[in-house]
Amino acid sequence: MSVDHVPVGGQHVDELVAGWAETTPSAEAIVCGVERISYGELGRLVDTEADRLRSVGLPDGGLVAVALDQPAAALAVMLGALRAGGAYLPLDPAMPREELHRILRDADPYVVLTRELYRIAAGDRPDRRVVCVDAEAGPAGEGGTQPHDAPDAPSARGATACVLLTAGTTGPPGLVPVSHHELAVARNAWQQVYGLDARDRHLYTAPPESAEFTAGWVRALGSGGTLILTDSNDPHDPGALGTALRRLIAEEETTVLACGVPTARLLTAQGLPPRTRLRLVTVTGDAWYLDEQRALKEALSGDVRVVNAYTVTEAFGAGAYYELPDLRHSPELGSQSVSLIGVPLPETYLTVRGPAPGTRGPIVLNGVHTGDDGRIREDGLLEFLGRQGSYASAERALHGHPDVREGLVTEVETKHPRDLKVVAYAVPAEGRTLDAVDVHRHVCRTLLSDARPHAVVCVPSLPRTRADKVDRKNLPLPVDVGTTLRNKGGTVGPASAQTPTGCVVVGVLFLVAFFALLAWVFTDLLWPFSTNVSDVPSPYADYFRVLYFFENVSFGAGMAFLLVGRPGMARVGHTGWFTTAAHLSAVWLLVAWWPQDNLYRLTAKTDWPAQAVLVYTFNVSLMIAAAVIAAFAAVTPKWRRRLSR
């Protein structure tokens, strides 16, 4: 879990922080609520936490799990772990206990630092060392530790600075080791691109357990600036967060704001205080479109830099960025629903492994597959095309509706097991009211049939995670995609008024009867005497008349299915060409009986050329049609297979 590189300049980032504590001890280092910590005070707090860890025998490279909900205290422990020669693993102590225990079991830290409130939750096994930072200090094994008779956890060998958790959007969160070298390279790259110095005051919305929090303290404290943290990060109350951020931007004279896409959209809608010192806004996390980037820049006064930043935890520090230029020089720029993430950061090797230059392919950062797709445009800029396996094209189409502020498209389960539907969630723009039917019609006009969502659900807002990303796991999922969903504001199937079921049945029966009557009339016109049973004895003559009746009805059913059957087959979720092939195959299976039997009855059994033509025209084609129908019924559509994995 380490990388054997020497940090840039031979100095760790935490040593840079210690250097600022020595040279500028009175400068403000951390602001969190009413708590204000200078660099000198921070240095003493870090020394205290390092001594605490040494007292429990932390070895060089030992991993320290930090499960604290107070950002300033968590940061002091993280830096203390680095000062003591170890590495840290930030955790949310309030996460589900089963998930917390799984992570502790996989990471196997030497010690867990937490509060008394979370002691029981953090003790995933009897021999786990648990130290409570709010308990009275005592000898090892007393006052704040649990006995640990088992052998020490494997050392991280000193090269690893921290172990971060992935976002868990495609599965359980994974562990990503980040070396001291990678922290130093990231700090240097950010300082070079963003021009950070000791005068900057950085406002971050990320919680302590996130990778963005580590990036925040590296940027701010590594350059001698001030790190401003929100003392409350309730993802269920975005309005309160927006109010708190506007206050902090004004009162704390923030110069650098780093936030996620949901917060950027919130600030764009609510606006920012006038006459701020803000000079740089970086937005990361989810797909952020160029027109949204332009809207935020227009909402900011002065020459504020607005950057769409892209990175993933698996390649911490490596990434790409796109800065919107001055709109006074490019007034036409920024009207498209595309997400540009621009060019790679310094010391980042970026490639898109598509089949050809300029085509869609996986994004790779420094050899790490990000799990996202993109393409390099003719102007050399990287365009973000969404998470692999996601419905990025449908989300772009949803975003293109003028009344939609934000939205996402995902798969949900109905009340039937393994019956999955693609559902679009749409949030109305400020002062707008969404018409679900109109939104669905807009998306369907934009997309291919096999990529269209089955329904549109209008919601006042999308849930957010503590890391300021859209929380797909806690969406207000509909109970069923059907009548229940319509009652929740969605529109199902084609974006049109729903016809009562009784009228549909009557209409289909009329079509069947009409085409069956045409078949009965045209039988004697096309094939004279083919249905003549005057020489057939009773009761067999009646048997043949019943057969002829069903042939006519089968023809009528086939013609009716040709006219009205395809929408029902399209809802299965197969691609358009497969659905069309299956639809026409079903029509042929029903229609073919009428001409086939009449031709066979009039053709002599010894007329071998005619018999061969009939066999290949009807028998073989019916076998092929049956095979297509069988494949259509047996093959699971790709989007269903993807969710079942």
Image (cartoon, helix red, strand yellow):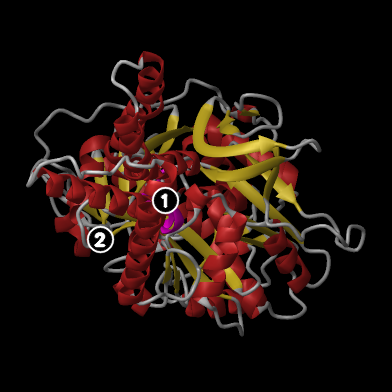
**In the rendering, at what x and y percent does residue 304 appear?**
78, 63
Q: Which of 92 and 26 is in front in this view?
A: 92
- Magenta segment includes 625: no
Q: Residue furthest bottom?
A: 431
Q: Which residue appears at 21% of the width and 58% of the height? A: 416
Q: Which amino acid does label 1 sit on?
A: Phe
Secondary structure mostly taken by the magenta-highlighted segment of the chain: helix
User: Which numbered disc covers residue 522?
Assistant: 1
476 lies above or below 216: below
Question: Dot 2, how many residues are within 10 Å of its Cα: few (below 14), some (14-19), or many (20+)?
Answer: many
Q: What residue type is labelled 2?
A: Arg
Disc 1 on helix, strand or loop?
Answer: helix
User: Which numbered disc covers residue 191?
Assistant: none
Quarter of the N terminus within the rendering: top left
Q: Say which residue label 2 marks.
A: 115
**In the rendering, at what x and y percent does residue 222 appear?**
60, 46
**In the rendering, at what x and y percent does residue 182 appear?**
54, 33
In the picture provided, is 571 more to the left or to the right than 296?
left
Q: Earlier in the sequence, mark 1 or mark 2?
A: 2
Q: Nearer the viewer, residue 66 or 545?
A: 545
In the picture provided, is 423 more to the left or to the right than 553?
right
Residue 127's image quarter? top left
Quarter of the C terminus within the rendering: top left
Disc 2 on helix, strand or loop?
Answer: loop
**In the rendering, at what x and y percent does residue 435 appear?**
53, 78
In the picture provided, is 162 more to the left or to the right than 137?
right
Q: Which of 285 and 273 is in front in this view?
A: 285
- Magenta segment includes 568: yes
Indicate which label's residue lies in the foreground, 1 or 2: 1
**For the magenta stretch, what is the residue range?**
562-574
